[in-house]
Image (tube, rainbow, N blue to C red):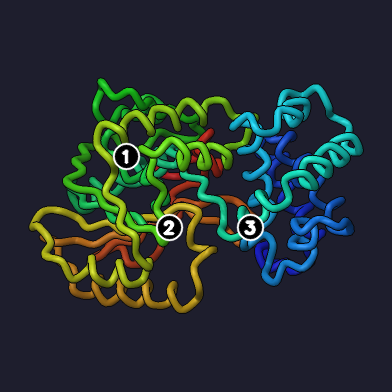
């Protein structure tokens, strides 16, 4: 069964909660389950959930209000939620009651959080991307031009500035304040040279990390059980204030088609990359991107290779898989590993 195709609202909410539990986020799961109790109530947010027009898991609908509630707490606007986030209340009925009270009092302010999917920009996902580049280096060469779709605030668009320790394999600048060291499962990735020549991204609604208010909104989407994610976000914000990431406001298909027509330096592999964004794109957009990549792939040469690297949700298992295609010579998708949605661990399949 394609789990992202679930249309029943309650089933989708419970499925999202189960996913949170599997990813060591019981508090977030309880906040999602509390939203079920809102569906029969009088709040506008509750009715928005009950009448959701799309597929709740594909749209990440349960995580939208979850982000809004966490933002209220982090911003100091709703300290009562600390009883849940800090673990003083664990009974689901009590959590349902408290969340219901908070939503009723902040109904109008929370409603806009449903307007767009969560922008869970997470630098921890760069570990999978760097492992993919190490793997590609031995096949197409060490120099890369990176193009990120759905870049959000550009956290991963700054991956060239991070230091990585991937099961002992080191990459990136050694003096970086951002240290990416996930729990590693399986053999280490290849030890190979990687030079990121340039990196650009696009998003329909880019977030300015240098703006304190928009950065605070982004923190709302971070699951409270994961303090390491807050530390990484603070490091990302500091780096962005030194030199903002290059993220254009653009449609993903339009931008991809445009980027693929730009002159490409000989000896540099052009890489399209994205993480946990494909499910949010309209089918027409996905079809255009796929067609553009395959057309460009046919024209790729050993001097000017092309690669497509994605960390996306397997629609049957709800796991996040690192898949790479490259041209010429690697047209068939290669499944290199799986990863925690927020970078806590990487399971690597390749030696």
User: Pointers 1 and 3 in contact (CB under 8 A)?
Assistant: no
Reading the image, the residue beneath label 2 is 205
Reading the image, the residue beneath label 3 is 114
**Crowd rating for badge 3 (residues with CA inside 10 Å; few <14, some 14–19, many 20+):** many
User: Mark 1 to mark 3: distance in Å?
Assistant: 29 Å
Whether residue 351 is visible here, answered yes or no, is no
Quick one: 70 or 87, which is closer to the camera? 70
Q: Quadrant of residue 304?
A: bottom left
Judged from the image, the secondary structure of the residue bearing numbered disc 1 is helix
Q: Identify which residue is drawn at 89% across, 34% down.
A: 94
Quick one: 61 or 300, which is closer to the camera? 61
| Depicted 301 relative to depicted 175: above or below | below
Judged from the image, the secondary structure of the residue bearing numbered disc 2 is loop
Comparing labels 1 and 2, the label whose residue is closer to the camera: 2
Judged from the image, the secondary structure of the residue bearing numbered disc 3 is helix
**Residue 49 on image: x %, y %:** 75, 60
Q: Quadrant of residue 256?
A: bottom left
> Which label's residue is closer to the chain start, 2 or 3?
3
Quick one: 136 or 49, which is closer to the camera? 49
Quick one: 18 or 189, which is closer to the camera? 18
Q: Is residue 349 left or right of residue 79?
A: left
**Crowd rating for badge 1 (residues with CA inside 10 Å; few <14, some 14–19, many 20+):** many
Reading the image, the residue beneath label 1 is 159
Position of the N terminus by quadrant = bottom right
User: Pointers 2 and 3 in contact (CB under 8 A)?
Assistant: no
**Residue 342 on image: x %, y %:** 53, 40
Q: Is residue 86 left or right of residue 208?
A: right
Q: Identify which residue is drawn at 79% across, 52% down.
A: 14
Q: Identify which residue is drawn at 27% across, 56% down.
A: 271
User: Mark 1 to mark 2: distance in Å?
Assistant: 20 Å
**Residue 264 on image: x %, y %:** 12, 61
> Which label's residue is closer to the chain start, 1 or 3?
3
């Amino acid at each position: 069964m394609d789990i992202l195709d679930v249309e029943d609202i309650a089933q989708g909410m419970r499925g999202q909660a189960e996913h949170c539990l599997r990813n060591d986020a019981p508090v977030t799961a309880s906040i999602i389950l509390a939203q079920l109790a809102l569906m029969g109530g009088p709040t506008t947010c509750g009715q928005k959930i009950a009448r959701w027009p799309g597929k709740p898991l594909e749209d990440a609908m349960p995580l939208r209000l979850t982000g809004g509630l966490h933002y209220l707490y982090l911003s100091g606007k709703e300290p009562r939620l600390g009883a849940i986030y800090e673990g003083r209340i664990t009974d689901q009925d009590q959590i349902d009651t408290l969340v219901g009270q908070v939503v009723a009092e902040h109904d109008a302010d929370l409603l806009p959080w449903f307007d767009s999917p969560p922008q869970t920009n997470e630098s921890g996902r760069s570990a999978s991307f760097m492992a993919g580049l190490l793997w590609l280096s031995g096949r197409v060469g060490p120099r890369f031009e990176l193009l990120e779709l759905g870049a959000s605030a550009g956290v991963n668009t700054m991956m060239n500035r991070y230091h990585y320790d991937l099961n002992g394999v080191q990459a990136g600048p050694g003096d970086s304040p951002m240290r990416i060291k996930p729990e590693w499962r399986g053999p280490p990735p290849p030890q190979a040279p990687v030079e990121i020549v340039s990196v650009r991204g696009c998003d329909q609604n880019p977030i300015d990390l240098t703006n304190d208010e928009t950065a605070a909104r982004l923190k709302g989407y971070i699951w409270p059980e994961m303090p390491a994610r807050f530390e990484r976000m603070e490091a990302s914000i500091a780096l962005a204030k030194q030199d903002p990431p290059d993220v254009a406001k653009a449609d993903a298909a339009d931008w991809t088609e445009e980027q693929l027509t730009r002159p490409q330096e000989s000896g540099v592999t052009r890489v399209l990359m994205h993480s946990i964004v494909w499910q949010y794109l309209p089918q027409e957009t996905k079809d255009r991107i796929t067609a553009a990549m395959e057309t460009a792939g046919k024209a790729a040469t050993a001097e000017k290779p092309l690669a497509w690297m994605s960390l996306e949700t397997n629609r049957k298992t709800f796991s996040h898989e690192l898949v790479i295609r490259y041209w010429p010579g690697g047209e068939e998708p290669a499944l290199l590993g799986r990863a925690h949605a927020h970078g806590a661990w990487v399971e690597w399949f390749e030696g």
